[in-house]
Amino acid sequence: MSESLEQGTAIVTGASAGIGAATCHELAAAGANVVLAARSEDRLTSLAADLETEYGVETLVVPTNVREEGDVDALIEETVETFGGIDVLVNNAGLARGSEVESLSTEGYETMQETNVDGVFYASRAAIPHIRERGGHLIFVASFAGQHPRPANPVYAASKWWVRGFAKSLAAQIGDDGVGITLVNPAEVRSEFETPDGETFAERFDEDEASDPREVAEAIRFAASREGSSISELDITRRDKFTDTFH
C-alpha cells in the first residue's frame, strides 16, 4: 500500500530527532516528498540532505516553532506553494516539562500546553483544507499516557488525552470528507525526548526496555499508506508493558 505515498507530500513536525526523524526516513522510503518542521534548522538541513541522497525524493526544510501560530501557518503555506498540496500531516512535535503539579511552574505548564495542544490545533486547522482536497491523512502522535493515568506527569498526560479526544472528534467531523485520521500511541521510546527530570529516554532505557523510534515510524507509514480507509488507533508498547503497569 506504500505506493499511495509515491510522489505525495508529507509534513512531519518535530522532525529533527527521534520519532520525527525516523518518520521522515520511512515516508521518504515510501516515495513521499517530505517537509521537515522543527526549531533546529541545522539538524533539519542535514536530515533533508540524507533523505534526498538515500531515497531520491524532494524535501523542504521549514524551521518552525509549533507554539507560534504564524510559524505554523507559514509552514502550511510554503508547503502548498512548493508542492501544490498536502497528502499527510504528522503531528509529532511534543514535550514534557516538570512532574509534580504543585511544583510545576506556570511557564512549564504553558510550554507543554502550547506545544502539545495549541501546536496540534494550529497545524491541523491550517492543513485540513489541503488534506481534504487530496483525500489524505492527519496523523497524531499521542501517547500511552493519553490512555491511562500518568502519576509521573499529570499535565503531560492531560495534553495527550486532549490530543486523542481532538483527533477522534475531528474524525467524526470530517470523516465524511474522505480525510483519514489516525492516532499512534507509543509508550516509552528510546529517543531524545526528555523525562520530567531532564534525562532523555535513550539514556534512561535499555534497548529491551523501550521501543525504537523506527517502530513508531513504521506504524505511521502504515497508517499514511491506507487508501480509502483509516487506521483509527495504533498502540505501540513493549510486550511486558501492561504487566509492569497494572500488577
Image: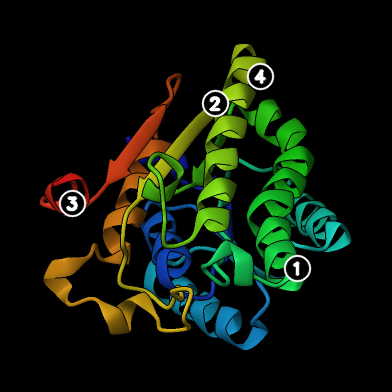
Q: Residues within 10 Å of mark 4 (few under 14, many from 20)?
A: some
Instruction: Please report the residue visible at 18 percent of the width from the left and 51 percent of the height from the top.
Output: 241
Reading the image, the residue beneath label 1 is 106
Q: Is residue 9 visible?
A: no
Determine the secondary structure under disc 3. Answer: helix
Q: Earlier in the sequence, mark 4 or mark 2?
A: 2
Q: Percent position (x, y) of residue 56?
A: 45, 67
96 up-or-down from 40: above or below: above
> Which one is earlier in the sequence, the residue at label 4 or at label 3?
4
- Quarter the N terminus occupies: top left
The x and y percentages for residue 104 are 64, 70
Give the crowd class for mark 1: few <14, some 14-19, many >=20 residues within 10 Å. Answer: few
Q: Which mark is residue 174?
A: 4
Disc 2 is placed on an element classified as helix
Q: Which residue is identified by label 2?
A: 168
Question: Residue 231, how many percent across, how many down?
Answer: 38, 28
Amino acid carrying label 2: it is: Lys
Mark 3 burial class by Cα count in 10 Å: few <14, some 14-19, many 20+: some
Gap in Å between the C-alphas at discs 3 and 2?
24 Å
**Residue mark closest to the camera, 4 vs 3:** 3
